[in-house]
Amino acid sequence: MAVFEPEAEGIVFDAEETGGDIVGRSPWALAGRRLVRNKLALAALALFVLIVAVSFAAPLYSNYVADTDPFASNISGTVTLNGKTEPVLQQGGGKLGLGETPIGPTWHSKYFLGADNQGRDVAARVLYGGRASLEIGIGSALLASAIALVFALVAGFFGGWTDAIISRVMDLIWAFPLYLLAISLATVLLTAPNGLKIGFIHLSAGSLWVPLLIIGLVYVPYIYRPIRGQVLSLREKEFVEAGIAQGASNFRLIFNEVLPNVASTVIVLMPLMIATTILTESALSYLSIGVQPPQASWGTIIEDGQSLLYTRPWVAIAPGIMIVLTVLALNVLGDGLRDALDPRSKVRVKG
Amino acid sequence: MLAFIVRRLLWMALVLFAISVLVFLIFFATPGVDPARQMAGRNPSAETIKSIKHEFGLDRSLPVRYGLMMKHMFITRDLISYGSHTRVIPEITSAAPVTLSLVFGAAIIWIVFSILFGVAAAVLRGTVFDPLLMILALIGISIPVFWLGEVVNLITQSRLHDSFLFSWVPPLGYTPLTQDPFMWFKQLIFPWLTLSVLYIGFYARVLRANLIETESEDYIRTARAKGLSERRVLFRHTLRTSMITFVSLFGLDFAVLVGGGALLTEVVFGLPGVGLLTFNSLTALDLPVIMTTVIYAAFFITLASALVDLVYAWLDPRVRLA
C-alpha cells in the first residue's frame, strides 16, 4: 500500500488540474476546492442552512403568517376558512364519535398542518421545535468536541500516567450503554424538584441546557478516541521535535503544532456528530425525558402526535420529516467533508 | 494469549463494578433526588417518608446500601422492586425472551440485506446503482427508529389496514413463540423490519467501504493474476477479509440491543421487553430494577466487547501486546 503524503498528493491533484502549472496551495485551499466540486455535498449544505434559517425564523412565521401563539392552548378557538368559521377542536371526530379531534391540515396560512390536542398550530410548533432541536444538537456536539479535544490533547501529548488515567475513564464511559447513561442522567435531573445547583450555576428542569449538557457529555468518548490516537502519533513527528529543539513550551507545542493538525478530524466529525446528537435529542424528547413543556422540540411534537396518529397523522409525520431531512443533509455533508479534508483516507467517492 | 484473556476478563469485571457504582451514585447521591419522596406520592408527610426510608433501608449509609443491593441481586437473588413490590429477577427473565425474539429476527434481516446491498454497491461501482444504494443507506441511517415505527403503524394498523395488503396484521403486542408461533411471527415482522433499517444502512456502507479498500490489496491482485474467476475472488478473498470489521461491529451492536438498546422499537410497538422494563424503572426511580437491568445490559455489552477483542487477538497476534 503506497503512503500518500498530503503535500505530494496535492501537487499531483493540481498538476492534473492546471496542466502542469504547479502552484503552492495550502491543504485548506485544496480541501475547499474538493468540497466545492462535490455538488451533492454542496446541496446538502444548502439544505441544512435552509432548515436552520427557516427554524430560526419561527417567530416571524407565527407572528406574521400563522398569527398564533404556538405555546398557548387554544381549545375553544375558531378559525375562518373560505368564509366558514370552524372550531379548532371538533367534537366527536373519532371512529366512535367520541372525544375531541383537532382540525386537520388546512393548507392555508393558519393551521397549515392542522392543530394538536391543545389547539396549537402544528406548523408553527414544528418551526419552533426545530429551533430547539438544532440548538441542542449543535450545542451538544460543540460541547462534546470541546471537552474531548482538551482531554485528547492533554492525554495524547503528555502520555504516561495522564494518558492512562484519562483513557481508562473514557473507556469506562464508552463501555456504559449510551442510552442507559443518557436516560439515567435525564431522569435524575428532571425529578430533582428545584433543579440542579452546581456552584453559581442553576439549572431548572425545564431548561434546554439539561438535554444539551447530557447529550454533550455522553458523546465525549466517541470524539476523544480518534483524536487521542492522532495526537499520539503527531507527538512523535519531526516538526514537534523541531519545536522542542527550539525550546517551545508545552502549551505552544500543543496549540501551534498539534492542534492545527487535528483540526481537520474535528471538522469532519462535526456534521456527523450533530446528526447523531439531533437523533439522540429527538429520542430522549420522544421518551419525554428530553425537552420539557412548554418548550417544544421535534421529538416532543412526535410524542404529542402519537395519541393523534390515526386521526391526525400530520402532527407526528411533519417533525419526523424535518428530522430525516436535517440528519440526511448532515450525513451527506459529513461524507463530503471527509472526502475533501482527509486525502489519506483510502476510500473516496471517486478514486 | 492466556495472559491476554485474564487481563481482558479482569477489565470486564472492573467495568461492571464501575458501571454499577456509577448508576448507584447517579440515583442516590445526586443532590435533590429522593427515591423515598418519589415513592410516597403527592404531598407526603415527614413520617411517611421516614417510614418508607426505613422500610427500604434508605436511611443507611451509601456503601452499606450498595453492598446490600448487590447481596440481594447476586447471592440471595431476592431483590424486591420498589414499585410493584415483586421480585426483580423473574421480571427480567420474563422480559428477556421478548427482546431476544425482536433482536434475533431483526439481526437476520439486517445481516442478509446489508451484505446484499454492500456487495451490490461495491460490485456495481462506477454505475448509477452504487450512489443510489448508498443514498438509500444514508436515508436509512437518518430516520429516527421511533418515527419510522409510527409511520409503519399508521400504514399497517390504520390507513391500509382494511386493504388486502395489511388486513392480516394483528394488533400491536407480543405472543410467545411457544404459545402460537404463527402469531408470534405476524406480530414481530414489522418491528423486525423497522429495527433493522438503521443497521442495514450502516452495515451496507461499512461493508462497501471495506470491500473497496480490500480490492486494492496486493493479494487480491495476486488472486486475479493466478487466474481465479471474479466471483471466486470476490467471495473467497475480498468479502472474507472485509467481513472482519462487519463481524466485530455486529457483536457489539447485537449485545447492546439484547441488553435493552431496542427500547424505542419496544415502546413504539408495545413489546414488553427488557428495554421497556429498564425505561419504566428509570422513570419511576425504581432503583432495584434499574440496577439489575443496567448490570444485565452492561454484562452483555462488556462480554461482547471482550469476545470481539479475543477474536481479534486470535486473528492478529500484534493486538495481544497492546
Image (cartoon, coloured by chain):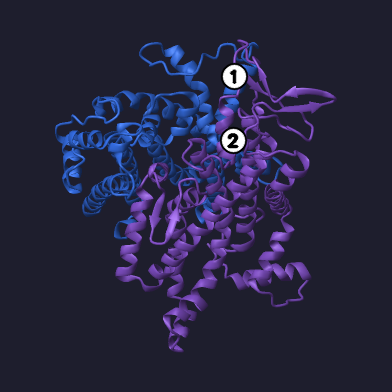
Residue shown at 41%/65% (left/top)? Answer: A151
Dot 2 lies on which element? helix
Dot 1 lies on which element? helix
- Badge 1, how many Cα within 10 Å: few under 14, some, many 20+? many
Chain purple in the figure, letter: A
Residue A346 in sight in this render: no
On the image, numbered disc 1 is attached to which residue?
A: B156
> Which chain does the residue under circle 1 lie in?
B
Residue B50 numbered tag: none
Where residue B313 appears, as percent x and y from the top left, is 32, 51
Res B296 → quadrant: top left
Q: Nearest the camera: A291 or B248?
A: A291
Residue shown at 18%/33% (left/top)? Answer: B55
- Badge 2, how many Cα within 10 Å: few under 14, some, many 20+? many
- Say which quadrant the C terminus of chain B sits in: bottom left
- Judged left or right of residue B245, residue B141 is right
On the image, numbered disc 2 is attached to which residue?
A: A301
The answer to whether residue A331 is above or below residue A15 is: above
Residues at discs 2 and 1 in contact (Cβ within 8 Å): no
Between marks 2 and 1, how big is the CA–CA gap?
A: 22 Å
What colour is chain B? Answer: blue
Amino acid type at image mark 2: Ile
Where residue A29 appears, as percent x and y from the top left, is 68, 70
Amino acid type at image mark 1: Thr
